Amino acid sequence: MFEDRITAGLQLAERLAELEMQDPVVLALPRGGVPVALPIAQKLNAPLDLILIRKIGMPANPELAAGALAEGSKPIFNDALLQAMGMKPEDFVSQVAEARKENAARRASYLQGRDPVDLEGRTVIVVDDGIATGATFMAAHFWLKERKPAEVILAVPVAPPEAVDELRPLVDTVVCLLSPREFWAVGAHYRDFAQTSDDEVTAALAAAPQAGAGKDKTWY
């Protein structure tokens, strides 16, 4: 049980600080991953950026993910689900276009025009507040491959064992503090799991170390 996302991030930061890394960059999955990622970025004095991913919902049930779209990448679809529903990726043109607009709007809002951090040849630490199924990270995986990092570390406070096992081959290292066999939901492992606001995301990103800048500010 973690007190809140910041406490979980502080614990992850201590574990990650023990690893050897090459010019690390911290990438958070917003919104909940950002307050977890900030203490890590500050501990490692590493820049903090975002992986922006939007779910592509089924037309009749938007909450059911037909796929996902990472910023600046091609959409990834659940082929088994589409086949079962008699659909094709071409049936989601409008949803994909809307997801692209949403990703662009979120980057402009959260990062205030700041350019994305170059990941090539660097250690990339991908952070979220927890993993339930790993579906979102699958889209992030293909997005990362296109950017040629030296290595990828997946760092999360909590995830079920089966999700960790599924994602482990996709990265160089998994750092997961808690992996209970009886897993109900990510939020069940936090005393305070209040929704992270857009303003909190913007403030955390502004407080993180900047490439080539001096000492960072403390946000939490």
Image (cartoon, grey):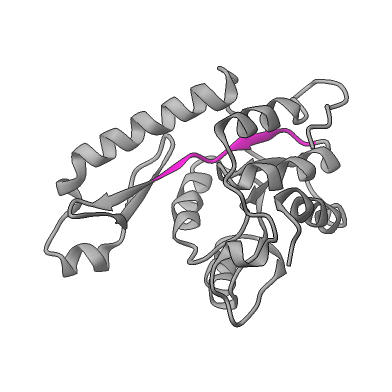
Residue located at (19% from left, 40% from top): 93
Residue located at (24% from left, 66% from top): 81
Residue 97: quadrant of the picture: top left
The percent coordinates of residue 184 (x first, y second) are: 54, 73
Position of residue 195 in the picture relative to residue 139 (left or right) = right
Q: Reply above or below: 214 against 7.
A: above
Q: Reply above or below: 188 against 31.
A: below
Residue located at (63% from left, 54% from top): 193
The percent coordinates of residue 133 (x first, y second) are: 48, 66
Range of residues picked out in magenta: 46-54
Is residue 55 part of the magenta span, yes or no? no
The percent coordinates of residue 118 (x first, y second) are: 62, 31
The extreme top residue here reads 113
Number of marks: 0
The percent coordinates of residue 185 (x first, y second) are: 54, 68
Position of residue 160 in the picture relative to residue 91 (left or right) = right
**Residue 182 visible here:** yes
The extreme left residue here reads 86
Residue located at (60% from left, 20% from top): 114
For the N terminus, the image quarter is bottom right
Residue 105: quadrant of the picture: top left
Seen from the viewer's position, the closer of residues 3 and 156 is: 3
Residue 24: quadrant of the picture: top right
For the C terminus, the image quarter is top right
Q: Reply above or below: 79 against 25.
A: below
**Residue 123 visible here:** no
